[in-house]
Image (tube, helix red, strand yellow):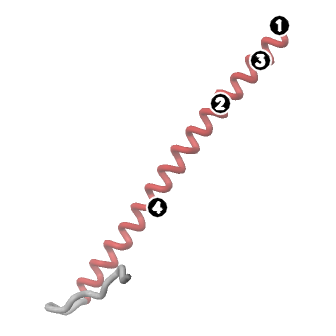
Amino acid sequence: MASENRVGAEIQRIRERLRAMRTEREAAMSKLAESREHAEAQRHVRAEAESARDTPAGHDPPALFAP
C-alpha cells in the first residue's frame, strides 16, 4: 500500500511538472510570435521611411501594400 501511494504521488508530481512545462512553452511561443510581429512591423516602417526619403517632393511614394 505504501509503495502504491509513493507511485501515485510520483505520478502526480510528473503530471504537475508536465503541466508547468506546457504553460512555460505556451508563454515562450506567445513571446516569440509577438517578437516576430514586432520585427515585421519594424521592417515595414523602415521600408516606408526609405521610400519616403527616396521620393522627390510633390510625388506620391509607391504603394507598399498594393491590392
Name the mark on residue 36: 4
Q: Which residue is mark 1?
A: 2
Q: Is 56 left, or right, of 25 in this rendering?
A: left
Name the mark on residue 17: 2
Q: Is 48 left, or right, of 38 in this rendering?
A: left
Image point (71%, 28%), residue name: 14
Residue extending furthest toward the left: 58
Which tag, 1 or 3, sits closer to the chain's start?
1
Which tag, 3 or 4, sits closer to the chain's start?
3
Q: Secondary structure at mark 3?
A: helix
Which tag, 2 or 4, sits closer to the chain's start?
2
Q: Quadrant of residue 17?
A: top right
Residue extending furthest toward the top: 1
Which tag, 2 or 1, sits closer to the chain's start?
1
Give coordinates of residue 24: x percent, y percent. 56, 40
Alpha-carbon span between mark 3 and mark 4? 42 Å
Image point (23%, 84%), residue name: 53
Q: Secondary structure at mark 2?
A: helix
Q: Which residue is mark 3?
A: 8
Image point (61%, 39%), residue name: 22
